[in-house]
Amino acid sequence: MLSADYLENMIESMGADYSVTVLMDYTILTMHVLEEYLDRAIYVLRLIVLEAVFTERELGAVRRTAFWELFEQKKNPEVLGWRQFLRILFENHPYQTATYSEEVIKFITTKDVSAFYGRFYRPGNAAVLVSGNIDGAAVAKKLENHFNAWVGQPVERAAVAPPSPNSGDRICYIEVPDVSDATIFAGNVIMPASDPDFFPFLVLKQVLGGTTRSRLFMNLRESKGYAYYAFSETEFFRACGVYWARARVRPEFIVPAAREILREIKTLSAEAPVPAEIEEAKSFLIGNLPTRLESLDGFADWMARAVALELDDGQWDKGPERLKLVNVERVRAAAQNYLARKPLVVVVGRPDWLGRFLRDFETVEVYDTSGTLKRTLRKGEER
């Protein structure tokens, strides 16, 4: 049995970089290595994937590291807001398990890890992607030699329905005593990346808050001076996607900043961007795509996501062509389909800032840094 330390030494002896990224629906194991060490790197990857053994000593070390990493993240308002945003959007949905707290780590056993490994690490549930200046046929032969002993039945994976989007006014406030500024998230569930609205919504998101020339940034920072920054982003999973606006704002402007974010989203849902905004957004997205694919890291990550999310070829190699076909009508339809829904709002701030929301919003849900609901307050109530 080879220990984790031994495998790490093997990787270091090749001058290779190895990383593991665990996402909502899949895991990516990545190794960067010189071509002369490719055969040995595939051998090490085979050891990791096919011959894993989980000991209590090594799991204990991982548990301690993961526990304290999650514990430290609770001091970061960006992380707190993002995790609570997902926790509420995915309430009563299988994806909610991915928003666990550090306390869960304490109770994971070697039996749990082995059961997960036995269930999901099977050849029918995996893909090996190799990129670089290589001979494809020769690499395929190497992979076959190393992985031909990998056997196992296909994984039975039940289809996961998308979560219901937020549909009503909902303000969630996370109390953190020692933050200097407020952090605001506002967004909702949207389509998966395989949906025809994917590219029109990317353009819409770009108009809303994709750059320093976008509506959110120009309004909250440049025009009103409420925020240090204000942007919008998207993330996509198998069952759905999510979009959110994110801003770091000065405490005295916490309520008007939240109001302006909601207003900008509502405006876009009712009135399509002007053609000039759409063309500028399309040009940025098309021009930025090559920079994401020009490095081996970027290309491998892009391809891994495309395979894991079961996207068709047009989602990654025909992106510019599909973006060019986006017009005002398609952007307007995507806005009506997704931005017209009431966004969920999550605010991270000090307890003494909460009273400002109670003067302006009908109901505020108050949470601690672990995501536990402490109380629900209504307009005019005392804290």
Image (cartoon, rainbow, N blue to C red):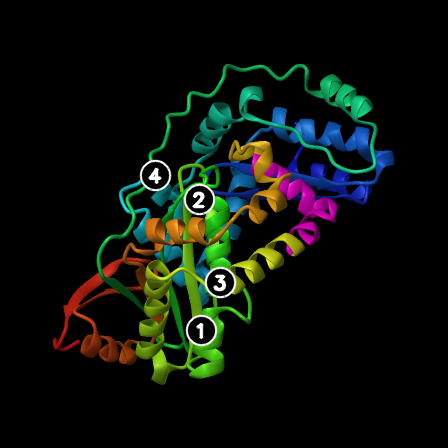
Residue 257 position, x and y percent, is 36, 76
| Amino acid on which disc 2 is placed | Asp
Looking at the image, is mark 3 or mark 2 earlier in the sequence?
A: 2
Left or right: where 34 falls relative to 125? right
Label placed on residue 165: none
Residue marked by disc 3: 207
Decide which of tag 1 and tag 2 comes sooner along the chain. 2
The residue pinned by badge 2 equals: 197
Labelled pair 3, 4 in contact (Cβ < 8 Å): no
* Picture quadrant of residue 282: bottom right
**Label 2 packing within 10 angstroms: few (<14), some (14-19), many (20+):** many
Which label is found at residue 162?
A: 4
Q: Main secondary structure of the magenta part?
A: helix
Q: Which residues are magenta?
A: 288-306
Amino acid at the residue labelled 3: Val
Does 156 lie within the magenta span? Answer: no
Q: Position of residue 229 (x, y in %)?
A: 49, 73
Compute the Cα span from label 1 to label 3. Answer: 19 Å
Left or right: 310, with 192 as reference point: right
First in residue order: circle 4 vs circle 1: 4
Between the C-alphas of marks 1 and 2, the distance is 29 Å
